[in-house]
Image (spheres, helix red, strand yellow):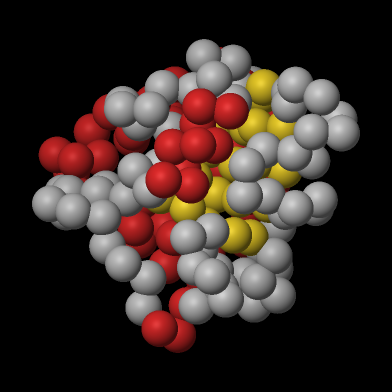
Amino acid sequence: MNSAATPPEPDTLPPFLHPGDRVLLFDGVCKLCNASVQFVIRHDRQRRIKLASMQSPQGQALLQWFGQPTEQFDSVLLIEDQGLSQRSEAFIRLMAQLPAPWRWLRLLRWVPRPLRDWVYDRIAGNRYRWFGRHEVCLLPSPEHRGRFLDDPS
């Protein structure tokens, strides 16, 4: 998979998105991914990053729009104006959106991508074994209203 895919047309937005939206797509049954989402919610105080599980109808539509697999999830994905980022590039771009000290992790961009992605793939490939998985996607709590694409508020 490429680390960044570009949207088909500049005037065409992916489904459910508005200009300037940033969306983190994550595996909704992965406990590590859910902990990462909680981390983003806690540290993204400006609420700039929207969230969607890949298993949700919105997540599935976005995966299809970007030509990504809709049944096997091996990377978080970050959708921004620049298109779709995945693996270590998505992580670095995500951290760059958060306040210090987390944004300083964007300096990892200086590490060669093959090495970054190798480390990412080791963690992603073992995430269920190391951290576990939920039987079903967790639902957002009421205090997180408006953070998820499937939330009407």
Left or right of residue 14, residue 11 in this image: right
In the rendered view, tell whether residue 98 sits above or below residue 107. Answer: below
Q: Residue drawn 14% across and 39% down?
A: 129
Residue 98 falls in image quadrant: bottom right
Seen at 46% across and 43% down, the residue is 59
Residue 47, x across and y down, in percent: 65, 71
Q: Could you say where residue 127 lies in the image, as x and y percent from the top left?
A: 25, 40
Outermost bottom residue: 143
Q: In front: 149, or 113?
A: 149
Depth check: 41 or 141 in front? 141
Could you say which is closer to the camera, residue 99 or residue 48? 48
Q: Position of residue 81 (x, y in %)?
A: 79, 41
Residue 72 to residue 78: above or below: above
Residue 72 seen in the figure:
yes
Say whether residue 6 is left or right of residue 122. Answer: right
How many numbered discs, if any? 0
Instruction: Please determine whether, in this image, residue 79 is positioned above or below residue 29.
Output: above
Q: Is residue 115 above or below residue 27?
A: above
Q: Is residue 139 left or right of residue 52?
A: left
Q: Quadrant of the C terminus?
A: bottom right
- Percent x, y for residue 57? 41, 45
Q: Is residue 118 left or right of residue 89?
A: left
